[in-house]
Image (spheres, rainbow, N blue to C red):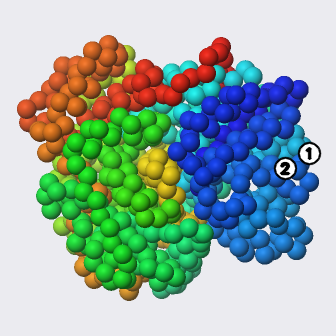
Amino acid sequence: MCGIAGIVSRDRELAPDAEALGAMLEAIAHRGPDGEGIHVDGPAALGHKRLAIIDLEAGRQPMCNEDGTIWITFNGEIYNYVELRRELARHHPFRTQSDTEVILHLYEELGERCLERLNGMFAFAIWDGRQQRLFAARDRIGIKPFYWTMTDQALLFASEPKAILATGLLDAEPDAAGLEEYLTFQFCLGERTLFRDIRKLEPGHYLTFRPGRDRAPADVCYWDYNYELDFHHTEEYYREQLVSLLNDAVRMQLRSDVPVGAHCSGGIDSSTVVSLAARHYPGTFKTFTGAFREGPQYDETRYAREVAENVRAEYHEVWPSAREFADTLPWLIYMMDEPAAGPGLFPQYSVSKLAREHVKVVLGGQGGDELFGGYARYLVAYLEQALKGAIYGTGSDPRYVVSWDSIEPSLGMLKQYRPMLQGFFKDGMFEDMDRRYFRLVSRIEDAETLISSDVWNDRSRERMFDSYAQIFNNPSTKSYFNKMTNFDLKTLLPALLQVEDRTSMSVSLESRVPLLDHRIAELVTRMPPAMRFKGGDSKRIFRESIQPFIPESVFTRRDKMGFPVPLTEWLRGPIRDFVGDVLLSDRARQRGIYRMAGVEQLLGKDAVFGRPLWGLLSLELWYRAFVDGDRLPPRRVGRAVAAIP
């Protein structure tokens, strides 16, 4: 786990700016406190900040092949590197025990097809001196980040946008379309970011660039979720395959030359990871959890403690406070580069900070809700469809339909989601599926009262719906369930993984997510939806598969929490001044984004700290950190170079 950066000049005869690369590495020093390296070869310069996990002595980067013609800078872990090394050693001499060298030799053998053999989380860039070509890739699911931009002089890439901005070759300017996407979903879609001209390499994509020949990099999709449903196998087969893959993913992801532990919230996903990991780990396993003292609705520690006791793990917990929230959030938004997802960012950072005091690597349960259907909104959406079918007698292929009779036993879990139900049904019913799910994922409530018409209007809403619909209406997804989960896998999950990456790397901790092994994703997306969500039963086949491994109290609980933060309680007390000082400041008023009367009403005496308020607070802190430059490191003195779209 590390930080990567690089510069490749457009002109093959022009050496890259080594000083700029140094500034990039300085900006992401938190990602790799164990070492730094730079390699310059003709028009290309690769940089690396190392967090040493595998082969602590010899695994330094950038690293080259035998004859020094191919160089790599790599962030992540290749979990099947032991097996690949054994295979490659027949033709290549190895100088290290690292997974980095495995990628190099696999690339020598297969070129771009090396990606097909890698099991892991990764973002890397290879400079092939023989072909004078850059080859960069990101893992299938998007666990590790890769950002890039093209100026009139060079291609710049890095693990975080702040590294690109640190060169001074690009100004931190907001992207208008990115802002619309953020206001709608509280994350950006596809390759877009909140920064004009800085792009994400999307999950499952690679890019190539040849100085002197290519005007811009070629971006290629090498992997995507497969929804060709397999009706030939039984549920028993799928359960057996899932248990086998879960065990193998956890076993491989425990490979490390430093101590490993795990996050444990007490929910079913992290409890599964902990329970399986403790079976494979050779020593005493350590778990880490967090909670808030504001009430039982913010405290899952009894479940997390029971999971740890069940596997005889060493248990650690942390209780973040309102004061820590106010003191930490501006810095966290800077570390995030751009705000994404919800306020779980804060407790996730607090637990990562605790974990780093004891281990250097943690496993977590990220991805289970998106893969297996764990969100209440899936049940809400099917509730409407089942009601519509019961009223109108409609329905098509029974393999794709959740009927009223089948869904009724699951409806009790919606008692705690009354606000979601009210919001969903207040503006109508029985529209097309894409329109209905858009209402469930859109965060732009009361936009007309909160956002200036110069920034958000009816045309914005339609543009955002069109962008959303291109993903939601994927022609390979035949069922409503697969359309919903596919949208979340392609949009929400990358946002949550951004949080996972930044909160862990901000404290130099490696975070691994076994449930997102791509083999598990490939198995699950081909399952008939009725197996994954039969009768609206959340995560049905996953729960049935892992029941033998987790405590009964965790298996039977239905009070899904998702690490809530007591923001409403805090807003009426300890953080009120902090939030008001940010959102009602002169800078916020002059921003031209917010309707201040609406913001003032949002912060009224009986204010509820919901997602609209969280979105505005995070956005204003982002403007301060990057556009205003409050938290940016010193920038290089020099001429800014306009980016090329």
Q: Looking at the rendering, which quadrant does residue 148 occupy?
A: top right
Q: Residue at x 51, y 28 (%)?
A: 633
Amino acid on which disc 1 is placed: Arg
Residue on which disc 1 sits: 130
- In the displayed structure, would residue 590 be above or below residue 579? above
Left or right placement of residue 542 versus residue 388 in this view: right
x, y percentage for residue 439?
32, 43
Q: Is residue 267 visible?
A: no
Quadrant location of the N terminus? bottom right
x, y percentage for residue 350?
34, 53
Q: Looking at the rendering, which quadrant does residue 394 occupy?
A: bottom left
State the SS at label 1.
Answer: loop
Mark 1 surroundings within 10 Å by alpha-carbon count, few (fewer than 14), some (14 through 19), many (20 or more)? few
* Relative depth, front residue between 438 and 331: 331
x, y percentage for residue 525?
52, 65
Amino acid on which disc 2 is placed: Ile
Residue on which disc 2 sits: 70
